[in-house]
Image (cartoon, rainbow, N blue to C red):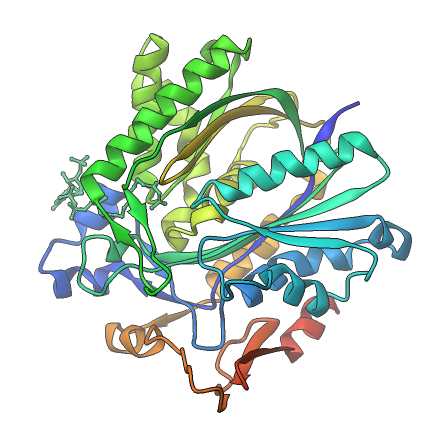
Amino acid sequence: MQLGIDDLAFATADRYLDLADLAPVHGVEVAKYTVGLGQDRMSVCAPDEDVVTLAAAAALPLVESLSEAELASVRTVLLATESGIDQSKSAGVYVHRLLGLPAASRVVELKQACYAGTSALQMALALVARNPEQKVLVICSDVARYDVGSSGEPTQGCGAVAMLITADPRLVAIEPVSGLHTTDVMDFWRPNYRTTAVVDGRLSLRAYTDSLTGAWQDLQAQGGPAFGDIDAFVYHQPFTKMAVKAHAHLTRVAGTARDAEVMDAQIADTLRYNREIGNSYTASMYIGLASLLDHAAADLAGARIGFFSYGSGSVGEFFTGVVQPGYREHLRAAAHRRLLDDRQRVSHAEYLEVIAPVNPVDGGEHPIEASTRSPFRLAGISGHQRVYERTAAADAAVA
Ligand code: CAA
């Protein structure tokens, strides 16, 4: 029996900052971002968007395409995030209500930096292996924020990916062998009292590639596929150039021939969406997968994909999956393209205004003006409670 990803959709904020508008503020040439980091734009959340609204927007098309009986078989929702909105309550419970999911289900939030989505995927596969009649909804949702003016600022972004994990999946069957690597390193973290991440940029690049080496070597020790048996590689993409650096690193570690054209073909299609979205932490690698499936000119049926998931701190996992015959009929490429093209460009001044944190701590009434055109919004904070609502855009999306 094959287990894996049956359906997949992503969402992002409906605004973006063009990095051409950030470069002069930092006093650098825009090529530092477009060439040096491989980023053109970054999605920017409005004050009434957060990981809950992004997660619900990503999962809406998946849920809407299920029959009532299929919906009843979704008995677990796993939401991975490193930019959660509560120390106790899972963001997934809000999402569960916004999507009208059945009460007979378990919902939890998982955290280990950008890696947690992959732990959710592996846990989902184990649950489906135990009962193949059940489906698990895995959602990865994050808002990447660094200090204004810091070197991390151009690598911000936000997004969510929803994946339905089932038996006999229509998109990608995940293979059972994984390579794992955990080590305690302070490359990137966010203490509870901060709204932006703390990062040692240089160390984080080294920690990422060290983790890739460790996870790859473990994959080989566990009997996983050789480098030459993998057709395409999807890496965690804090900025897309990182995937290019990672792939060059892996070819060295694996000791394979290094042909620039072949190496480019193995990763190029995975980078397209994230160039326009920026970092979405847990969601980033799976947006890379959507990018590959949506853009590949050749039919990828039967192709083996290698995935490297990295979460600072750090945990890395290298695993593989095989693209399923007929997968193209189940892609959401047109909707993904529309989502990115319909975003509104904001000026640098507007960007600074919308990212100002909304974090009242007095327990009073704090309505938030409606500004997002997304299907769900944060309507306010009232008596310490976050109040979410469905918008007219949700009905339009379903119609
Ligand atoms: N034209 C073309 N390229 C240029 C250029 C120009 N005018 N000016 C500079 N560049 C190139 C540089 O040569 C460099 O490329 P190489 O690394 O290939 O040499 C690239 O642009 C970036 O320049 P710098 O190294 O000088 O950039 P920086 O020090 O200002 O910041 C950074 C880079 C450290 C990655 C910073 O953006 C950062 O801290 N980002 C956040 C942390 C991060 O993303 N880490 C990644 C690994 S950790 C992880 O993956 C988890 C996660 O999601 C955060």
Image position of 310 with respect to 226: above or below: below
Quadrant containing the C terminus in the rendered view = bottom right
The one of 42 and 352 positioned closer to us in this rendering:
352
Image location of residue 6, percent across then percent down: 72, 39
Image location of residue 261, percent across then percent down: 34, 21
Q: In which quarter of the image is residue 217?
A: top left
22 vs 251, left or right, is: left
Image position of 302 with respect to 117: above or below: above
Image location of residue 145, percent across then percent down: 33, 60
213 vs 304, left or right, is: left
Ligand 1, by image quadrant, is top left
Q: Quadrant of residue 251?
A: top left
Q: Which residue is drawn at 74% across and 36% down?
A: 127
Image location of residue 385, percent across then percent down: 56, 79
* Residue occupying the far right of the picture: 69
Q: Can residue 168 be seen by looking at this rendering?
A: no
Image position of 138 with respect to 175: above or below: below
Image position of 187 with respect to 147: above or below: above
The one of 268 and 27 positioned closer to us in this rendering:
27
Q: Which residue is drawn at 30% across and 73% down?
A: 351
95 vs 216, left or right, is: right
Quadrant containing the N terminus in the rendered view = top right
Q: Residue at x 68, y 68 (%)?
A: 397
